[in-house]
C-alpha cells in the first residue's frame, strides 16, 4: 500500500509503514511536516537524496523519493 503525503491534511504521526515523498518535501524528516507531532517520536532527518529510499530508525517507516 502506498500513501502519498499531501500538505492539505495532517496525518497521524508514524502510523503507516510506507510513504512516497517528492522533491518539494525535502529535506525529509520523520515525522514529516504533514504529520501531527503531539504523539510522535523525536524528529530525525533522513538522507534520501542519494539512494531514493530511507528508513526511520525510530518507527521503521520506509520513505521512497518520487522523481518528478
Image (cartoon, grey):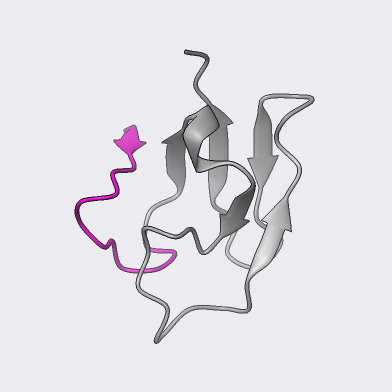
Q: Tell me which corner region of the image, top left, top right, bottom left or bottom right, holds residue 45.
A: bottom right
Q: Position of residue 39 (x, y in %)?
A: 41, 85
Q: Quadrant of the N terminus?
A: top left
Q: Is 48 on the left or on the right of 66, as rendered?
A: right
32 drawn magenta: no
Q: Which residues are magenta?
A: 1-15
Residue depicted at x 38% and y 53%: 16
Q: Position of residue 51 (x, y in %)?
A: 76, 24
Front one among 48 and 68: 68
Please tell me whether residue 8 belongs to the stretch shown in magenta: yes
Q: Is residue 40 left or right of residue 4?
A: right
Residue farthest toward the left in the current orientation of the protein: 9
Q: Is residue 30 left or right of residue 35?
A: right
- Residue 22 sits above or below residue 16 on the image: above
The residue positioned 50% from the left and 41% from the top of the image is 25
Q: Residue at x 42, y 78 (%)?
A: 37
- Between 56 and 10, the residue placed more toward the observer is 10
For this rendering, which residue is in front, 35 or 41? 35
Residue at 36% from the left image edge and 58% from the top image edge: 34
Relative vertical location of residue 40 with respect to residue 10 in this rendering, above or below = below
Name the residue at the top extreme.
Answer: 68
Where does the image place residue 67, in percent across and percent down from the top left? 52, 14
Amino acid at each position: 500500500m502506498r500513501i502519498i503525503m499531501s500538505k492539505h491534511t495532517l496525518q497521524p504521526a508514524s502510523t503507516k509503514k510506507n510513504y512516497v515523498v517528492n522533491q518539494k518535501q525535502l529535506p525529509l524528516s520523520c515525522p514529516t511536516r504533514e504529520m501531527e507531532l503531539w504523539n510522535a517520536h523525536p524528529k530525525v532527518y533522513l538522507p534520501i537524496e542519494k539512494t531514493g529510499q530511507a528508513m526511520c530508525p525510530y518507527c521503521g517507516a520506509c520513505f521512497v523519493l518520487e522523481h518528478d
